[in-house]
Amino acid sequence: LVNTFSAYGKAVEVRWAGAMEAAKYGALAVLVRSMTGSLDDYPHTGSMGYDSSGRKIPAFALSTVASELLSKTLESDPTSSVMLESDCRMLPDADSYNVIGELRGRSPERGILLAGGHLDSWDLGEGAHDDGAGCVQAIEAVRLFKLCQYRPMHTIRAVMFMNEENGLRGGKAYAEAAEKEQYPHRYAIESDRGGFVPQGFSFDVRSASEMAVFQGMRPYFSPYHSDYFFIGGGGSDIAPLKNTGTICIGLVPDAQRYFVHHHAATDVLESVDPRELSMGAAAMAAMLYLIDQTP
Ligand SMILES: [Zn+2]
């Protein structure tokens, strides 16, 4: 599979550390070319950081078309200048909450199976793919069980995490609370790669024998072409649960178009195909069902 997340992962360092690196050389500000495979007029935002030196220069997201224009302009006239204006600032912390719903299991001592996504998003768009899709799919997986009148053995919990984009505080707080719960979180599935047609799952397993159990489930997903199973990360919101022994799983959809909308003004409901979104929810529900059925 073409993995656009791999390219993003290697390029995003420029956005994250660009301002602090440029400041060392006396830069007044940085302009960051948007991390997208598309040539368009939409700037893509995202998290960035400063070091402890106290030098905090502003950082601006620039669309790919604007970046090309800037490069060409500077080539033909190196004395060109850019005027920048920003009213961005950090506001004080405010309370916010994870939102949780659950279907209680018949044998709750077997533990909790979690399905989740994150509620927060960047404010250029609506966060429909990142990560409204994941939240809706987690709710939909639980709704499908209710619709089929399936009473799971495990307790199945849909969790919409808060504050993924700006520090992961919802995921961290959830994991802290989970440690104090009566029953352990056995497995957690996150959908945070867009509401596109599912292609498989990424398993954050500790051993080959754990992976073999999941490999045995592949035939159920083959008819839907969502049987691409590999060892990898589960998702950022559920990652803190790993400390409590939870096995984390990521829903892996077709990522070709994800970074076209990621953190940009086009990440709106109209960019999500309802059928593809539903297929992802069905894949998530199927995985939860198979785990619930596995002794
Ligand atoms: Zn996300």
Image: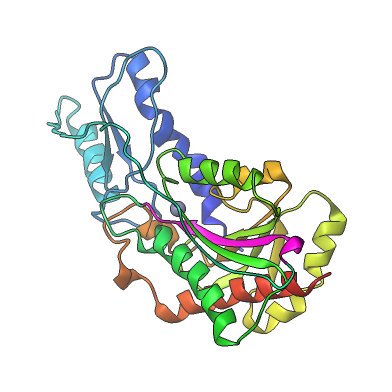
Asked if 50 appears above or below 202 in the picture, the reply is above
* Front in this rendered view, residue 4 or 16: 16
Residue at the spot 32% in from the left edge and 49% down from the top edge:
122
* Front in this rendered view, residue 122 or 1: 122
Asked if 47 appears above or below 119 in the picture, the reply is above
Q: Is residue 137 highlighted in magenta?
A: no
Outermost residue to the front:
182
Q: Is residue 118 highlighted in magenta?
A: yes
Question: Where residue 37 sits: x, y (%)?
Answer: 40, 55
Question: Where residue 272 sits: x, y (%)?
Answer: 38, 72
Asked if 189 appears above or below 162 in the picture, the reply is below
Residue at the spot 28% in from the left edge and 41% down from the top edge:
61
Going by the image, does 166 lie left or right of 288?
Answer: left
Image quadrant for the C terminus? bottom right
Q: How many marks?
A: 0
Residues in magenta? 108-120
Q: Is residue 164 visible?
A: yes
